[in-house]
Amino acid sequence: MTKPVPDPRHTLTLRDVSEASGVSEMTVSRVLRNRGDVSAPTREKVLEAARALGYVPNKIAGALASQRVNLVGVVIPSLSNMVFPEVMTGISSVLDGTGLQPVVGVTNYLPDREETVIYEMLSWRPSGMIIAGLEHTDAARAMLGRAGIPIVEIMDIDGTPIDHAVGISHRRAGRQMAEAIVAAGYRRIAFMGTQMPNDHRARKRLEGFEAALAKAGLTLADREYYSGGSALLKGREMTAAVLARSPDVDFLYYSNDMIGAGGLLWCLDQGLDVPGRIGLAGFNGVELLEGLPRRLATMDACRLEIGRKAAEIIAGHRKSDAKAGNSIELFPTLQPGDTIRKV
Amino acid sequence: MTKPVPDPRHTLTLRDVSEASGVSEMTVSRVLRNRGDVSAPTREKVLEAARALGYVPNKIAGALASQRVNLVGVVIPSLSNMVFPEVMTGISSVLDGTGLQPVVGVTNYLPDREETVIYEMLSWRPSGMIIAGLEHTDAARAMLGRAGIPIVEIMDIDGTPIDHAVGISHRRAGRQMAEAIVAAGYRRIAFMGTQMPNDHRARKRLEGFEAALAKAGLTLADREYYSGGSALLKGREMTAAVLARSPDVDFLYYSNDMIGAGGLLWCLDQGLDVPGRIGLAGFNGVELLEGLPRRLATMDACRLEIGRKAAEIIAGHRKSDAKAGNSIELFPTLQPGDTIRKV
DNA sequence: CGGTCGGCTGTTAGCGCTATCAATAGCAGA
DNA sequence: TCTGCTATTGATAGCGCTAACAGCCGACCG
């Protein structure tokens, strides 16, 4: 019944399947999308023909005709640190059942690049957008606001969302860590972090951290920034530099776990008494820490949950477009590990 | 000149811009795509109208009309280990200048899932596909072969590519490592790796490794597999288990650097003489290793270069469709680090 | 001064699919 | 037997954009 592909260079269309199975294109379309009533024998005929030909539907045409695109744009600054892959896992786990598919764009922490990525994504008319952070160019905000689709800004809630936001308060996270450190009796505290003007979440954590120190009558004893390279190695180097410059520092606060782990390994190498002589803390709660000789104090960033909740907002948007509760705040827990003195 | 958006709920089309600027849709299209001759004043008028309205072109319609899609599908098994993000970096760095955009799909090492992801991607009619590995379901191979676009299978070249392949020989990599280990005088060698039947590259490395051992008259003294969890921690646990069970083992070969790093940290914790009493080696050459107390022996997998070369094949396909040299083999270098005895 | 060319703009006809409605057949009930 | 219904299938008209070609106009040539 099924004749061989006539022209192997020609990409197949519904018409080819329709001719091969002897029904109209419309019926083939219905079978392939599993929509509308089609009799069992017809369905079988069509499916067999499609399989035999190796037909792959053209979603471009389908999306244009139906004005429906099952794509969700996800815009994140980086894939190389361990944090965003886990957010992606959360997103995928929710989207998997819904027929929606995530499409990732990476911005490298560059606002202009982010604007471009957003523009590109919107031009595919996705069903929703998930974007890391609350800070965007004016043009990006405008585009997103006008897109007519659900927008979820994730990771951070210290600011005004365009539509929805899911995240934690990094200012509060910084504050909490500072309070715990001060409560444990540390007084000469140094900070180490990335030199990234556009990592607003790290910035806000530090702001909260310093604010809490100020409330306790303290200021940072020293600070050091890095950019690029192996975070673990940079953590070692920065720690060595800070302790050489400020030998009386008794606590090291890192803007992320990776450099914190490097610092911890260095301190242990040096035989420093951790957490007696010196304490350390990072941020993110990355899985990696579990394998270290000592567990670094940290705060989990609720990454999985953020991804999940964001995806739920997008997926649930079809039913209810009620704009209730635009910001969802999650609360990270402080994990003291073994690198802060017990009070 | 520019009247306010008439219906804020209505998504803008070329017609809106065309009406707002008083020229035909075609001219607007030409301006926005920067194609064909348009007079400077007209161009200005159009651009201003588009900007004022906040128009975002509909690529779905554009792609359908022009039969051109500037997307490249990238299908990889995972984002959570450090290896694929670097491949992505290589791909992006080449694609960035070409107007092509990568779209990532993750398969979690599941063949059926991979088939689905490929099907979904092909249904968007991308300009090319980059896929990790040479092992796919029959259906997946058939779809890819018929798609009429350049297909590049990456990471591995031990097998027959559908179209192009860029990668290293994992069998050879395993063999080389085994030879180096044997040459350094180690004799009782244990292996630790992931329990993943579908990680064919890890499997091939081990095959090559065991083949080389056999040639030297040796067999693996012990082996241990894990799945899930923190790789660093698992490395520690497995190492402890293996050395408890087989105390006379003098070398530990890990299927990836992460568990190798865990094993190394554990050995150092125990005060074992590395590399005198016991040697260790991993695979991948991840950046993380640089921050460890001792550099783990490893082999870089040429990840950046693989991504780059794969992207070049896709990007270059427009000009020449000459199918010369379908497989590109890269050659990883063995980095002995500090965990193999110097001969 | 007619002809021609190049720069610029518009018109027409789809791309491959789906929404919508029309058509047909089969069949129960009046 | 005829009506009215349901189940199934087909015909038609776009979705928003671009390729291809057509048209217009002023400049420039012989």
Image (cartoon, coloured by chain):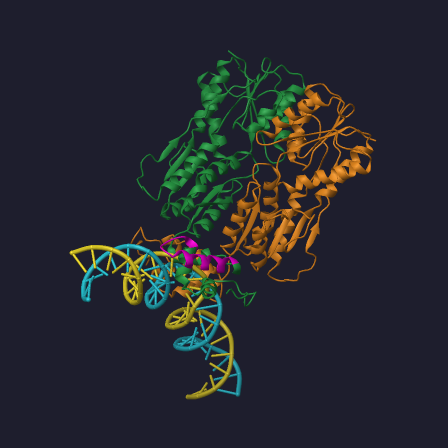
Chain colours: A orange, B green, C cyan, D yellow
Pick whichever, A187 or B226, lies toward us: A187
Residues drawn in magenta? B32-51
User: Which quadrant would the N terminus of chain A be assigned to in this image?
Assistant: bottom left
Question: In the drawing, does residue A30 fall left or right of residue B291?
Answer: left
Q: Position of residue B288 (x, y in %)?
A: 58, 28
User: Which quadrant would the C terminus of chain A be assigned to in this image?
Assistant: top right
Question: In the drawing, does residue B318 fall left or right of residue B74?
Answer: left
Q: Is residue B304 magenta?
A: no
Q: Quadrant of residue B257?
A: top right
Q: Position of residue B69 (x, y in %)?
A: 41, 51
Looking at the image, can residue B98 be seen? yes
Q: Main secondary structure of the magenta part?
A: helix
Q: Is residue B47 magenta?
A: yes
Q: Quadrant of residue B316?
A: top left
Q: Position of residue A130 (x, y in %)?
A: 59, 50
Question: In the drawing, does residue B117 fall left or right of residue A85?
Answer: left
